[in-house]
Amino acid sequence: MMSTAIFPGSFDPITNGHLKTLERASKLFDKIYFVVLTNTQKKYLFDQSERVTLAKVCLRYLDNVEVVSRTASLTVDVAHELKADFILRGLRNEQDFSYERAIAALNKTQDPTLETVFMLADPTESYISSSMIKEIAIFGGNLKELVPQEVAQALQQKLLD
Ligand code: ADP
């Protein structure tokens, strides 16, 4: 049977941390849907279509990863719609663990058959966050090791607007 996972998130913007996690996970699942969602708790620098476009450009090289866009949906509903049995999430640290454990438990109340699978970030990526990257970009810092080139350019462009 084909194993299908969704990797849901805001991805504002996609970082080397997300990419590295996906690269590793793409060997574990037959198919991964990279789902760009709107998290109602967050304010975004890039709008939905910009986040989707950046993800598509950066993920071209992964054959079994497909970028999809879903605004205002429950993660479990997206998984059902895409016929996925797994939700993939990344863990960088203890804060991620507490947050992700709560989300996973709540998702279980919606569908107990849907498994959340966690991938530990590699040490080199574990300090990368979209919010820190925006901070570095605002002050003109070096983004080379943190995001793909296309994202660095988009950040610079955005901050000129
Ligand atoms: P959300 O708004 O859903 O938290 P994010 O874009 O911040 O969306 O994160 C999406 C997923 O990617 C989350 O599971 C998060 O823990 C994970 N993630 C974020 N940064 C990294 C990183 N540097 N390495 C590995 N996983 C990461």
Image (spheres, rainbow, N blue to C red):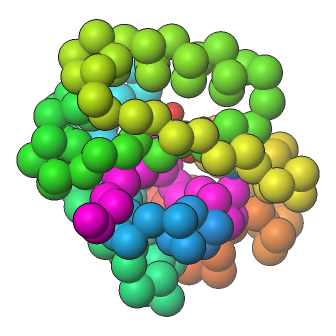
Q: Which residue is at 47% across, 46% downward?
A: 88
Q: Which residue is at 23% across, 31% downward?
A: 76
Taking depth in this image into account, of 30 and 107 the one nearest to the observer is: 30
The answer to whether 47 is drawn above or below residue 56 in the figure is above
Q: Residue furthest front?
A: 1
Ligand 1 sits in quadrant? top right
Residue 44: image quadrant is top left
User: Which span of residues is magenta-colored?
Assistant: 1-22
Residue 65 shows up from this direction = yes
Q: Is residue 22 left or right of residue 70?
A: right
Q: Position of residue 54 (x, y in %)?
A: 43, 70
Q: Quadrant of the N terminus?
A: bottom left
Q: Is residue 84 left or right of residue 27?
A: left
Q: Position of residue 127 (x, y in %)?
A: 83, 44
The answer to whether 122 is drawn above or below residue 98 in the figure is below
Q: Which residue is at 16% across, 54% downward?
A: 82
The answer to whether 131 is drawn above or below residue 29 in the figure is above
Taking depth in this image into account, of 10 and 90 the one nearest to the observer is: 90
Q: Position of residue 157 (x, y in %)?
A: 53, 69
Q: Residue furthest left?
A: 81
The answer to whether 30 is drawn above or below residue 68 in the figure is below
Residue 152 shows up from this direction = no
Is residue 59 rendered magenta in the image?
no
Q: Is residue 128 left or right of residue 161?
A: right
Q: Which residue is at 75% across, 38% downward?
A: 92
Q: Position of residue 34 (x, y in %)?
A: 37, 59
